[in-house]
Image (cartoon, rainbow, N blue to C red):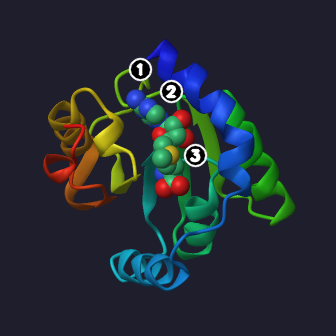
Amino acid sequence: MKSAKVFWDKAAPCYAKSPVKDEETYQKKLSITRSYFQRDWSVLEFGCGTGSTAIQHAAHVDHILATDVSPRMLEIAERKAREAGIGNIRFQEGSLETLDLAPSSFDAVLGLNILHLLEDAEGAIHRVHALLKPGGVFVSSTALVAEMAFY
Ligand SMILES: C[S@@+](CC[C@H](N)C(=O)[O-])C[C@H]1O[C@@H](n2cnc3c(N)ncnc32)[C@H](O)[C@@H]1O
């Protein structure tokens, strides 16, 4: 976990500057995600990076808890949210393992471009399930690790 934090802290300034590779697909994913949202929803995002997606969704839900292991990523995310005038995202450092989150407390959990980076992706999915209210949704967009050469 410490090495992930070091790696992503270093990567953060560059990550923040890199443009979305496929804007059309990104917009489609935002739109599909929003089709599940309701205005009074409480949303958790883990591995939120520099907060771009949470910022895009903030106006469509009640509040978002956006979390990441990298303080540098969160610092950038907080600044971006502030500059965008977004007040309903709380940023918190930590992972699904370390964060003290109440069971059945979120209507939706977002885990975007993150599952393939975790040592125990299955464990993470179990944790997400425990954090979701009954009928809640888990939105994930993840590389197909089984098809990746290095796996
Ligand atoms: C590829 S980036 C994706 C960021 C964002 N979700 C996106 O789609 O742009 C992966 C992010 O996950 C974070 N991360 C890595 N390991 C993590 C873990 N175990 N728990 C939570 N976040 C983690 C990194 O700090 C980084 O911000």
Residues at badges 1 and 3 in contact (C-beta under 8 Å)?
no
Residue at 29% of width from left, 43% of height from top? 116
Dot 2 falls on a residue whose secondary structure is loop
Residue 125: x and y, percent?
A: 20, 42
Which of marks 2 and 3 precedes in the sequence? 3
- Considering depth in this image, is 11 or 89 the residue closer to the camera? 11
Between the residue at mark 3 and the residue at mark 2, the CA separation in whole angstroms equals 12 Å
| Image quadrant in which you'd find residue 95 | top left
Q: Is mark 2 within 8 Å of ligand 1?
A: yes
Which of marks 3 and 1 precedes in the sequence? 3
Mark 1 or 3: in front is 3
| Image quadrant in which you'd find residue 108 | bottom left
- Considering depth in this image, is 95 or 63 the residue closer to the camera? 95
Please name the residue that numbered disc 3 is placed on: 49
Between the residue at mark 1 and the residue at mark 3, the CA separation in whole angstroms equals 17 Å
Dot 1 falls on a residue whose secondary structure is loop
Residue at 75% of width from left, 44% of height from top? 76
Q: Quadrant of the C terminus?
A: top left
Residues at badges 2 and 1 in contact (C-beta under 8 Å)?
yes
Under mark 1, the amino acid is Thr
- In the rendered structure, find residue 98 and report the number of the disc placed on it: 1
Q: How crowded is the residue under tag 1: few (<14 C-alpha within 10 Å), some, or many (20+)?
A: few
User: Given the current orientation, which residue lies at the most extreme front position?
Assistant: 149
Between the residue at mark 2 and the residue at mark 1, the CA separation in whole angstroms equals 6 Å
Number of numbered discs: 3
Please name the residue that numbered disc 2 is placed on: 94
Q: Is mark 3 within 8 Å of ligand 1?
A: yes
**In this orientation, does residue 32 appear?**
yes
- Considering depth in this image, is 119 or 54 the residue closer to the camera? 119
Q: 13 left or right of 147?
A: right
Under mark 3, the amino acid is Gly
Residue 93: x and y, percent?
A: 58, 29
